[in-house]
Image (cartoon, helix red, strand yellow):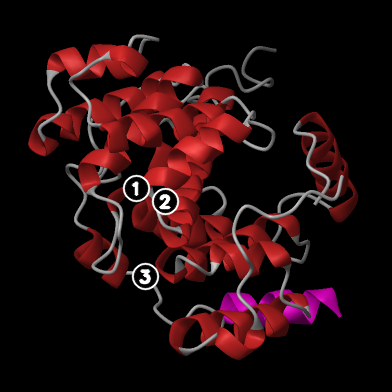
Amino acid sequence: MTAALGADEPAATQPTGLLEVLAEVPRSARWILPALTAAFCGTDVSTLRLRTRSLVLLRVAAIDRAPYWRLQLEAGAAKLGITEEELLLVGSDEWETSPGFSELERAAILWADRVARRLARRDKRAFETVQKHFSDEELVELTLVASLGAMADRLTNALRIAPEPPIGLSPGLGRPDESLGAWPSRMFETEVAASWRANSQ
Amino acid sequence: MNVPPRVPIVQDDSATGEVDSIFRGAEDLLAFVSNFARTAAYVPSVTRWLIPMIASIQRGGSDAALDLRIKELVILRTSTRNRCFF
């Protein structure tokens, strides 16, 4: 009876790490990973400094209570000059008054905080603060980084992906040129795009 | 619901280089260039991946794990919770 139910068969291996989970949906993963890499690690044309980028992502991960991304980001923080004390501050509500962060960094963290809390749309004061320090281009990049950070938090939190060693998506540890170079560089001229078109007609 | 945008959207006549490529790709893939794409286009290094990422998640097709009705319900519920009128 037991054998007939397959009790003696080895249990199917469940994907555990983020990359393994994403491999379950290759159609989307091939775009999600380079999008996250470009946003989190920057590219040679990015205007936002890696340290600022990291502080933004750390704040979003703190708001979202995302242990997976906090570990990923903390692993690369020291290389960007982010101290242990600053890690604690950006994860708490004390960052606003800390002299450790520059005014520009505080503005970036404020905007990240509002994006993560879904308050950015109506928070006029936060927008005015961030607007003093960032150009339109930088503001959009800042918002994209925070938004994609929140998306990544939702993904790992919802699927309960356990924290794991760095996978190359930390601003302090990523190598964007090498990792992005491994992905298709011409976005719409691929089999996938052709497949979408064919299936949507 | 109609509040002024925080940054002006990128118009067709000012789209050059990679931004123009992204716009043409969005038209090809989605049949139009959305205001979202026109805003995200300030950062083409991210948007070049973002547009197909969103399309791949939202669209159905033989290589999609979920059917379109389920996807639509999920998207509608998430947008409603986020008060996202776009």
Q: Chain of mark 1?
A: A
Q: Is residue B21 magenta?
A: no
Q: Are marks 3 and 2 on the same chain?
A: yes
Please report contact status of discs 1 and 2: CB closer than 8 Å, yes or no. Answer: yes
The residue pinned by badge 2 equals A36
Give the CA distance from mark 1 to mark 2: 6 Å
At numbered mark 1, what does the secondary structure look like: helix, strand or loop? helix
The residue pinned by badge 3 equals A183
The residue pinned by badge 1 equals A40
At numbered mark 2, what does the secondary structure look like: helix, strand or loop? helix
Residue shown at 49%/50% (left/top)?
A144
Please report contact status of discs 3 and 2: CB closer than 8 Å, yes or no. Answer: no
Quarter-of-image position of residue A6: top right
Label 3: how many Cα within 10 Å (few below 14, some 14–19, many 20+): few
Q: Name the quarter where the N terminus of chain A is drawn.
A: top right
Q: In the image, is residue A51 above or below residue A164?
A: below
